[in-house]
Image: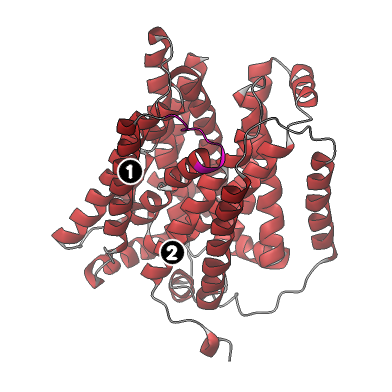
Amino acid sequence: MTKKAMLVCILTDVHLWVPVIVLILGTTLLMTLR
Amino acid sequence: MAARTRSTISLHKLGVFCGLAAAVWLGSAEAPTKLVNEGFSPFLISMGMVMGAFVARWSLPTMLKGTGFVFTDLREKPHLIVWALLGGMLWAVANTLTIFAVRNVGLAIAFPLWNTNSLVGLFWGCLLFKELRGSRARDWAKVIGGASAIVGGAAVLALATTQSTSAPGRAVVGIIAALGAGVLLGTMYIPYRKAYISGMNPLSFVTIFTFGEVGTMLVLGLVFYGGAHPLLAELHRARTMLFWPFLGGFCWVVGDLFQQYAAKYIGISRGIPLSNTNQLWGLAWGALVFGEFVGLAMGAKLLIVAGSTIMIAGAVSISMAAPPPSELENWNGAMRRECDRYALDTGTVAAVVSGDDPLADRKHTRRWWEVLIMVAAVGVFIWLAVGTRAQHIYVNIPWMLVLIAGTIVPLVLVGTLLWRRTRFS
């Protein structure tokens, strides 16, 4: 598998975006509470 | 030859033992932090724990498998480095949120709220990794009922141990922070499970996980303290107590490693609720060693017994819910998805997932830098221990020895079992 193909697979993987979105929301919450 | 000497214990039983051993160590990891007198910010204590965790996440895998094994494993599944880093970042933000929660509503209320992470993990496990799919109704009932009982038992324990209430105006913020931490921690198990159905070794995973953890904690530290100088000054001021949270972080990693193996062998929907019974062990340390509940009313004592019983019943319920073949077929479907997507060898991954990693029995040359890693880890421990100020806190020595023994026994027994069955794969 080429690096480019792997990158595409990673970026289109729902398993990536669910934690990323939760991380963004969690960090936003943390900064708001601060 | 080596395969013949392997234990034949079922992976479900092994995973259950790992989940319970994780609970013992994750609960005991709280004990060293209790030895810290007040006067230091919770953030600093958390940072000390992360430093201990960093040292443990490098030294333990190096000692158990060697860097050669870890690097080979990482080279075969390089895409998972992204998820390992992501998992560490989620943990760091979640841990900081829990500090806010503890500050505003106290540990007793915050703990059961973030304990909901097991329900969040159960949801993601079912939705994204097909856990519980194809299972019988009674298995669903055992797992969901067991996880709910563990959260419910945590709530009862919290009610019993609530000593004081914080200012009402801050309570809402604390509750939001605790629930947010629960969602983040529950989501953190997505990277765990993804790594293990792709055939990654938990020891390799945590080696990368820690960079996400430490990097995010450093960024948060810089933001919270307003730069490197104030942060370093605070760390310097805390020098005399840093050993204790550092030790706590080290113990936490031992528990987390067992938790990782539980997530690998019985999935996150079963493994995480089991490891979340760690509150029982935290309670045992608090009650028996630190005498926290001296003078507690009879009603509160009864609540503690009731909450503990509910939690244990929940753990027993999950332990008895071994996945039937129809569910395991769905687990395999989730594994094949990873193999197809990332061009992994299905046969090899299937072997690793079932605890028979072909790499495990292969000899890996030990490297000279592994000695350096171990020496550095021991050196940091000694450096922190020297100059640590004695903390004036009540400790019941006989009970402490009993609980230390109770912590070491599962480490040896379950560690041996893991080695005999999987060679730590």
**Could you tell whether A27 is left or right of B146 in the image?**
right
Identified by mark 1, the residue type is: Val
Q: Main secondary structure of the magenta part?
A: loop
Identify the residue at image location x=66%, y=30%.
B36
Q: Nearer the viewer, residue B423 or B394?
A: B394
Q: Residue at x 46, y 75 (%)?
A: B351
* Residue B142 rendering spot, x and y as whole percentages: 22, 56
For mark 1, does the 10 Å Cα neighbourhood hold few (<14), some (14 to 19), or many (20 or more) residues?
Answer: some
Q: Which mark is residue B8?
A: none
Q: Identify the residue under disc 2.
A: B17
Q: Visible in this render: residue B82? A: no
**Numbered range of the magenta stretch:** B288-295
Please, what secondary structure does the residue beneath circle 1 have?
Answer: helix
Tell me the distance, in whole angstroms, between the alpha carbons under discs 2 and 1: 23 Å
Closest to the camera, between mark 2 and mark 1, is 1
The answer to the question of whether label 2 and label 1 lie on touching residues, with beta carbons closer than 8 A, is no
Q: Is residue B316 above or below residue B6?
A: above
Closer to us: B321 or B36: B36
Q: Position of residue B77 (x, y in %)?
A: 56, 60
Tag 2: amino acid = Phe
Location of the N terminus of chain B (image quadrant): bottom right
The residue under label 1 is B305
Q: Is residue B104 magenta?
A: no
Examine the rendered structure and indicate whether residue B390 appears above or below residue B70. above
Q: Residue B110 location, x and y as percent?
A: 41, 28
Q: Is residue B289 magenta?
A: yes
Which quarter of the figure has residue B290? top right
